[in-house]
Image (spheres, helix red, strand yellow):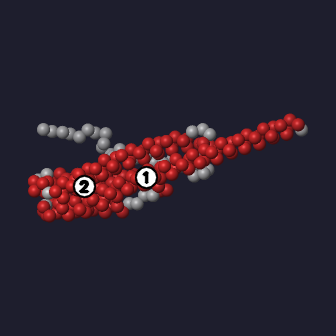
Amino acid sequence: MKNFKSKLLSLLVAVCAMGLFSSCNYNSLVEQQQGVDQAWAEVETQYQRRADLIPNLVNTVKGYAAHESKTLENVVAARSKATSISLSAEDLTEENLAKYQQAQGELSGALKSLLAVTEAYPDLKANENFRDLQVQLEGTENRIATARTRYTQIVKDYNVAIKKFPTLLYAGWFGFDPKPQFKAAEGAEKAPNVEF
């Protein structure tokens, strides 16, 4: 009987110790999950900033390059598609992030086409409003890259934390699931063909 009580006491101490350890680790996971949510919000903010610049850019170009209406329509349509996809931190899954990233990639491609068209219009390139918008757009693209890099690092840290022992034993019970990472765009592994 004494041996049974000793084993029971040891088991209770182990369960209490595990509970205490897991509650401390739980708080850390909550902080990391909030960090992921905050980093995602920053990514969305920078994409929204870019979307907000586009109407001004399109209107400025429209005045100079009216016959480039197809390019302008493509930019407006891509912006509309990109801003129609709303992805909250709670809905971050591989599939949802891929759809979001595809829409943003289409917008990036449309903007590149628009900026390439503007090369044929020296008056437009000399326009102060256009230059300012182009500088703001370039700055926003840099901010997007920075926000995505921060998100990627924070998600990596979070995903590692929930996969470490003993956390992996109970992280799923409390709803701490892995968060998705950005993936390179299709064809990004191929170097662009440069010809002179």
Q: Amino acid at mark 2?
A: Ala
Secondary structure type for disc 1: helix
Q: Residue at x 62, y 45 (%)?
A: 24
Q: Decide which of tag 1 and tag 2 comes sooner along the chain.
A: 1
Which image quarter: residue 153? top left
Say left or right for 114 vs 154: left
**Of helix, strand and loop, which one carries label 2?**
helix
What amino acid is found at the position of numbered circle 1 in the picture?
A: Trp
Real-space CA distance between mark 1 and mark 2, rounded to the nearest whole angstrom: 24 Å
Q: Is residue 162 above or below residue 100?
A: above
Q: Is residue 177 above or below residue 49?
A: above
Point out the residue furthest to the top here.
3
Q: Which residue is mark 2?
A: 110
Quarter of the image containing the N terminus?
top right
Residue 60 horizontal side relative to residue 47, left or right: left
The residue labelled by disc 1 is 40
Q: Against 179, is 3 above or below?
A: above
